[in-house]
Amino acid sequence: MAEADTDLGYTLAVDTMAEPSEIMTPVPGLVLKDRYLLIKEIGRGGQSLVFKARDLVAAKAGLSKADVALKIITAGPEIEPDFVALMHREARRLRDLVHPNIVRVYDMDRVQNLHFMVMEYLEGDTLSSFLRKAEDRKLELAQVIRLVQDLGSALEFAHANGIIHSDLKPGNVFVQTDGSVKLIDFNISAPIAPSLRKDEEDTIRILIRLGAITPSYASPQRLEGHEPCAADDVFSLAVMVYLCLAGRRPFGPKNALEAMEASVQPERPEHLSSAQWTALMKGLAFDDVGRTPEVTNFVTSFAAQRQSAADWIRSQLSW
């Protein structure tokens, strides 16, 4: 084992006896593709780890923002191969999906058994973490309005480019230190256009087989296995908005199908106007025919009366 100086103040352990076929483990200090230095683990999902990393090329070039986030899947017998395929497709979609409220993805690569996606490094925390720390697990109405505006903008852009997120939930929403919101984790996003669906029919089959949705936030149609559409994202966004306002999900512990069968109706949260409550209920409609079909309509109807104060909200809002 030898040591190598990165010229950036890091001393790395380098295994001089490593063979190309050797299995690699993502740990701090490891450098991937002679470029990405893993600094520390900052998150994890069911199949992946997320590391803060230093782009050594960018740092050596003197760029001010050399830190990136690496989402890594370690391929092996215990990892479902289709999850690796889905992450590659997520990266392919997001490289072209550039929007201020969507996490930026720069590249996708692999080293031996490690498959990784290179993303912008975000400072802040997930919405789920903010809710756990908030009083009564609720947010102020002004915060919820900003959330709706930022996420609505991200979803409008994604839908316009033919992509349904398909897994909206607090864990996939990131609140930055400046209060702005970014939509993350498009791992199970799905194409809208029939031509794209035809090209990615295996993606749809993978999603159905793996059951890759979060039932608590999914629409009845997604739970029944229907093809995803924009109204599914509207439903998930409405569930999340209700959670932020009330401190609980609209149907309690039941998912949408269970709530529909039991005729569960959500109670109106405090501080909502009649117009906002009507907008929220239309977003939560079980029947997709009666549900607000497009996220643009939901944002407009929920936040319309506060649009004139949007700049003030953004300047005053503190998470």
Image (cartoon, helix red, strand yellow):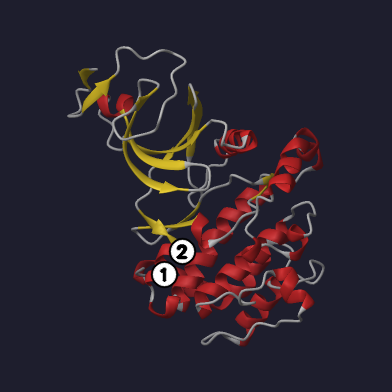
Amino acid tagged 2: Ser
Whether residues under marks 1 and 2 lie with C-beta atoms below 8 angstroms apart, the answer is: yes
Q: Which residue is mark 2?
A: 128
Determine the residue located farthest toward the front in the rendered image: 77
- Which of the image's four quarters has the C terminus? bottom left
* Secondary structure under the numbered disc 1 in the rendered image: helix
Q: In which quarter of the view is residue 26 placed? A: top left
The disc placed on residue 58 is none
Mark pair 1, 2: CA separation: 6 Å
Side (left or right) of 1 relative to 145: left
**Residue drawn at 40 percent across, 72 percent down:** 312
Amino acid tagged 1: Arg
The reply to whether residue 277 is visible in this rendering is yes
**Residue drawn at 50 percent across, 58 percent down:** 171
Side (left or right) of 252 relative to 265: left
Number of labelled discs?
2
Determine the residue located farthest toward the left in the rendered image: 9
The disc placed on residue 132 is 1
The reply to whether residue 303 is visible in this rendering is no
Side (left or right) of 165 relative to 179: right
* Secondary structure under the numbered disc 2 in the rendered image: helix
> How many residues crowd around disc 2 within 10 Å: few (fewer than 14), some, or many (20 or more)?
some
Q: In which quarter of the view is residue 38 placed? A: top left
